[in-house]
Amino acid sequence: MQEAIILTGIILKTVPIGDYDRRVVLLTKERGKISAFAKGSRRQTSRLLAATNPFCFGEFKLYEGKTSYNIMEASISNYFESLREDFEAAYYGMYFMEIADYYTRENNDERQMLKLVYQSLRALQHPKLSNELIRYIYETKAVVVNGEYPGIPTERQFSESAIYALSYIETSPIEKLYTFTVTDEVLAELKFAASKYRQRFMNYPFKSLEVLETIQNPC
């Protein structure tokens, strides 16, 4: 029998399979993005019932088959429970996961993206940080992490404060990314920059973003 492997990662999404199983997409430190089956995980008595939901971060024990991975056990260190209790924050988190799913690949070194997702979800739990600001920082840093950052957009003039903020996002370690706030005027500038990056590098119909925009602009 093949030996089990232990991977550290976060569940980006889950898909129900049959009556009781799930297929999950994991972003891992060791093997980048992988898909794995969690057999019986939708049964109420399963040890994997709570551990195979989106946002779950921890260690996963898997067996690697010829064509897929199978999750046998999980030790979750952070469930991000508060996100599940805040409708808007949950959709911000799901949007971050969708971007990570869009960008990452199997067997790539995705440690920086994993770290970015984790720290961004933690930031969403911080009561003094604006979810909107977290989003624009995340969108910009995701482009940086993937080596596509083109610099400050040239379509408009930016204030010195916005230029400083964009430079900080580009160069700061991910652990120190969410340590500042901005005025409404600078936030609007960061929104403009992030939208340009998203249109150029992530031109994809993210479902959770559509829901977020409906929440924020109901009319």
Image (cartoon, rainbow, N blue to C red):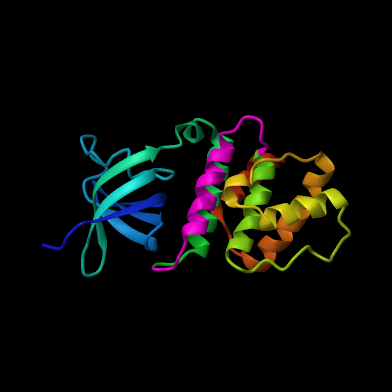
Residue 145, quarter of picture = bottom right
Residue 164: image location, x then y, percent: 79, 52
Look at 20% across and 57% down and name the residue there: 4
Q: Is residue 168 above or below residue 156?
A: above
Residue 130: image location, x then y, percent: 68, 37
Residue 43: image location, x then y, percent: 23, 39
Residue 14 placement, left or right of 113: left
Residue 36 placement, left or right of 165: left
Q: Is residue 211 above or below residue 127?
A: below
Q: Does the magenta segment cover residue 126?
A: yes
Look at 30% across and 49% down and name the residue there: 60
Q: Does the magenta segment cover residue 196?
A: no
Look at 75% across and 57% down and name the residue there: 193
Part of the protein shown in magenta? 107-130
Residue 136 placement, left or right of 154: left
Most extreme residue toward the left, as rendered?
A: 1
Quadrant into which the C terminus falls = top right
Quadrant into which the N terminus falls = bottom left
Residue 180 placement, left or right of 175: right
Look at 20% across and 35% down and name the residue there: 45
Residue 27: image location, x then y, percent: 42, 56
